[in-house]
Amino acid sequence: MSDCLFCKIVSGEIPATKVYEDETVLAFRDIAPQAPVHVLVIPKVHIPSAAAITQENSAVVAHCFEVIAQIAAAEGLDNGFRVVSNCGPHAGQTVSHLHFHVLGGRQLALEMA
Ligand code: AMP
């Protein structure tokens, strides 16, 4: 998607602080961190949101979660962490490319909404 911010990070058109990259998944630090560790894990392929996950594209989503576990270990999040994916306007999704926020490094608030 030529006008997608995260596709531009995947292509290198926009810089990011990468913490992990392989053929199908990229992880980079959030530009406005909400916790001491705030990493975004994305599939390189453009999937607009969690609402667009299908049997055809879900393998990369599973791989995202393998990467999340690796990143959590590498970042020392031994006391736990949170994985969040905002989907659509009611959830406050601002970038229409599926991404998983990995938040940790301090005690997080318990509120879910
Ligand atoms: P969401 O609001 O759930 O769609 O999350 C989008 C996230 O992308 C926000 O936490 C932003 O701070 C983050 N973000 C926006 N632009 C960039 C960027 N250029 N590099 C890294 N993170 C970004």
Image (cartoon, rainbow, N blue to C red):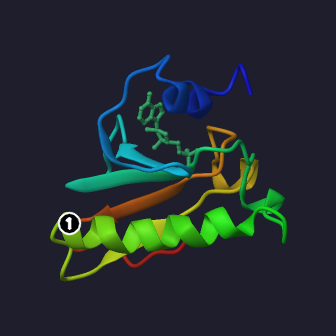
According to the image, label 1 marks what residue?
A: 74
Q: Is residue 100 left or right of residue 55?
A: left
- State the residue lying farthest toward the front: 23
- State the residue lying farthest toward the bottom: 79
Say if 106 sits above or below 87 in the image.
below
Counting labels gives 1
Q: Position of residue 60 (x, y in %)?
A: 64, 62
Q: Residue at x 49, y 29 (%)?
A: 9
Q: Position of residue 40 (x, y in %)?
A: 43, 50
Which type of secondary structure does the marked residue at label 1 adopt?
Answer: helix
Q: Position of residue 97 (x, y in %)?
A: 66, 43
Evaluate whether residue 49 shows in this view. Answer: yes
Closer to the camera in the image, 40 or 92:
40
Evaluate whether residue 106 shows in this view. Answer: no
Q: Residue at x 68, y 69 (%)?
A: 59
Q: Position of residue 79 (x, y in %)?
A: 19, 83
Q: Which quarter of the rendering shows the N terminus? A: top right
The image quarter in which residue 105 lies: bottom left
Q: Residue at x 29, y 35 (%)?
A: 17
User: Which amino acid type is marked by label 1?
Assistant: Ala
